Amino acid sequence: MYQSKEAMPGPAAEICERIWLSIAERKLRPGTRLKEEQLAEVFEVSRARVRQALAMLESDGLVTILPNRGAFVSEPGVDEARDVFHFRRQVEARVMERLISSIDDAAIPQLEAHLALEREADARGDTTATIRLSGGFHLLLAELSGSTFLTATLRDLISRSSLITTMYRRHSNHNCGPDEHAGLIARIRARDLHGALQLMDDHLRHVEEDLDLTEDVPVVRDLRDALV
Amino acid sequence: MYQSKEAMPGPAAEICERIWLSIAERKLRPGTRLKEEQLAEVFEVSRARVRQALAMLESDGLVTILPNRGAFVSEPGVDEARDVFHFRRQVEARVMERLISSIDDAAIPQLEAHLALEREADARGDTTATIRLSGGFHLLLAELSGSTFLTATLRDLISRSSLITTMYRRHSNHNCGPDEHAGLIARIRARDLHGALQLMDDHLRHVEEDLDLTEDVPVVRDLRDALV
DNA sequence: CTCAACATGATTGTCGACATTTTTGTTGTC
DNA sequence: GACAACAAAAATGTCGACAATCATGTTGAG
């Protein structure tokens, strides 16, 4: 879990970014093997860079590295998926508590500006940007709450949520609509903690309910684990 | 935040371990610069190894890496310290909820076995082992709760708590006594959720109150940040 | 024909050397 | 004597080549 957003090894972060985007766009499907040499060629960087990037992505839970075997796009199971969403609801609740008890009015415009970006991306049908900005909204909430820890944790959770969403979503991809975000801003402005908590919880459950978490897809990466 | 305890680059983990221990033993004080070459010489490994280890320790919050400047033992401020403890109380509460709702009796002996180790270390005055085992108890609780996420998060929190404790502790180092852990086991065995939550919260507050978090020690690492 | 042992190819892991950046020390000028 | 520009030293960042490991394909004995 990287905490400072921009202080990490700059050039490697860009590789992360592009791989992340490819996963979000479903170009890279879960289970796909990520060969270092290949990535190095595609991105025109050294293999060491790729290695750094993969290590970061692993700590974000997006890829799984098997020693001497290679890196794969993670395939979170349904139990892990539910775990992530369950925990995320808790964390976002804590964020909201802190935020409402400490936010000053000067911060509200930041939220509205972000919301505007979301609506714009949504309007022009830019799915990738929508997913990204949607997570960014929640992350912004955490940053404004002033807790570096909540921020770091939520950042991790959002990455995983995104991957889970791309794996298990069944309907179209309204990954979490800007409208509900607008409602959250309204509650925050009114310092309505109870309402905000309620809406946030509904919001997150809504996202989870859009997923098909009925059956586990036990695509094992290592056959040794399959025949146990 | 590394999740799988043993699946990380094995040899590098050992370096982590030893640095971690040195920090816990207060051999390495917060703010100390960690030169890669020097560490490589001491541990008789390549500099690349040291680099890996430092990257891990950074993600655990124990060291801070400034690009092109080097790695330093982190110096969490009082606000960050309170943040960590506050969040940790929340996480440990969630752990306890899950644990008590899902634990089976076969797991109890594991807790007791761990407690025995703690008592033994405490009895022979092995401070380092005591600190380590004390954190390990809480981590074991998380593992038994079955949530990989809670476990990973708590693991991170415990690392930071340990560093904070070494920085701000004022009394002797009864970092969190085995006796309170025994109480927790009793509550768990009795499936007494309310009592367990209460005791856990007291326990953690107790640890925090033993610290001197009155004044921030603004030891800046980069002078450029000091004269702003 | 089956299976085990071996050889081959591909991929990851590791290390040492070089380039870059920062810091420290020196010199020279005003 | 103070300060700025420059030079030397040290530490970090980066890269390419080699070694270790794993998967695959082949061969040969039973």
Image (cartoon, coloured by chain):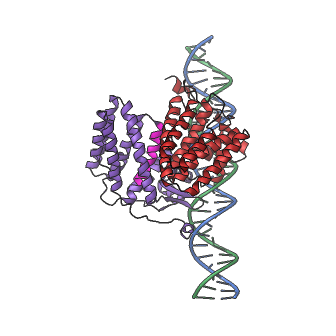
Chain colours: A red, B purple, C blue, D green
Relative to D22, say whether B139 is above or below: below
Residue lying farthest front?
A: A190
Q: For this rendering, which residue is in front, A1 or B17?
A: A1
In magenta segment, residue A63: no
Give coordinates of residue A176: x percent, y percent.
61, 37
Residue B117 located left or right of residue A195: left
Instruction: Name the foreground residue: D29 vs A203.
Output: A203
Image coordinates for residue A148, horizontal then vertical, percent: 51, 52
Say which quarter of the image contains residue B97: top left
Residue B177: image location, x then y, percent = 29, 48
| Range shown magenta | B148-163
Q: Which of C4 and A58 is in front in this view?
A: A58
**What is the quadrant of residue B25 in the picture?**
bottom left
Query: In the image, residue C12 lies at what x, y percent?
Result: 60, 39
Q: Which of B55 and B82 is in front in this view?
A: B82
Do we see residue B4 in this rendering?
A: no
Task: Give the vertical position of A212 relative to B86 (above or below).
Answer: above
The answer to whether residue A151 is visible is yes
Please, is residue C8 above or below residue B206 in the view?
A: above
Q: Image height check: is A169 above or below A180?
A: above
Q: How would you classify the magenta stretch by its main secondary structure?
A: helix
In the image, residue B158 lies in the stretch drawn in magenta: yes
